[in-house]
Image: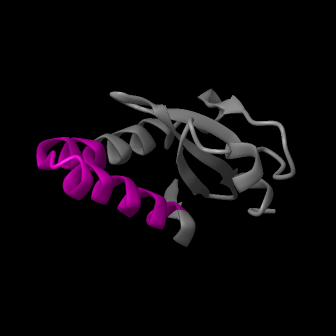
């Protein structure tokens, strides 16, 4: 199964990486975060239904925590032959409002 990061998900990852790198001055945490996202998505790849269903406007949208950064969740859905990552968001953000725009 192919993994596809939609542009906004890529932007989310870059912003969080930059936050750790620049604002927190924690380059090791930034690198660990990036690797944790990759590892977490690869964990989902063979078993997409293990994530929690996220009620909303995107049918089949699920969420899964980033390993080691559990407040940050991966929002994704399964498409034919593909796991599509829609967003990667911190739980302190207005997740429902943000995801409403992803319809």
**Residue sitting at 19 percent across and 49 percent down?**
31
* 63 vs 3: above or below: above
Is residue 79 shown left or right of residue 28? Answer: right
x, y (%) of residue 41?
44, 44
Viewer can see residue 6: no
Of residues 69 and 53, the one nearer the viewer is: 69
Is residue 24 shown left or right of residue 45? Answer: left
- Colour scheme in use: one colour
- Range of the magenta residues? 9-35
* 95 vs 85: above or below: above
Is residue 44 shown left or right of residue 69? Answer: right
Give yes or no for residue 21 being in the magenta stretch.
yes
Quarter of the image with the C terminus in it: bottom right
Is residue 94 shown left or right of residue 42? Answer: right
Give yes or no for residue 84 being in the magenta stretch.
no
**Residue sitting at 77 percent across and 63 percent down?**
101
Q: How many marks?
A: 0
x, y (%) of residue 49?
66, 33
Viewer can see residue 83: yes
Of residues 15 and 46, the one nearer the viewer is: 15
Of residues 94 and 66, the one nearer the viewer is: 94
**Residue sitting at 52 percent across and 63 percent down?**
4
Q: Main secondary structure of the magenta part?
A: helix
* Outermost residue, bottom side: 7
x, y (%) of residue 23?
25, 53
């Amino acid at each position: 199964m192919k993994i596809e990061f939609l542009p906004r998900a890529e932007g989310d990852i870059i912003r969080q990486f930059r936050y750790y790198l620049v604002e927190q001055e924690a380059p090791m945490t930034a690198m660990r975060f990036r690797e944790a996202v990759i590892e977490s998505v690869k964990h989902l790849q063979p078993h997409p239904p293990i994530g929690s269903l996220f009620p909303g406007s995107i049918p089949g949208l699920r969420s899964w925590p980033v390993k080691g950064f559990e407040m940050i969740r991966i929002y994704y859905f399964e498409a034919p032959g593909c796991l599509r990552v829609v967003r990667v968001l911190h739980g302190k953000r207005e997740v429902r409002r943000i995801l409403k725009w992803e319809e």
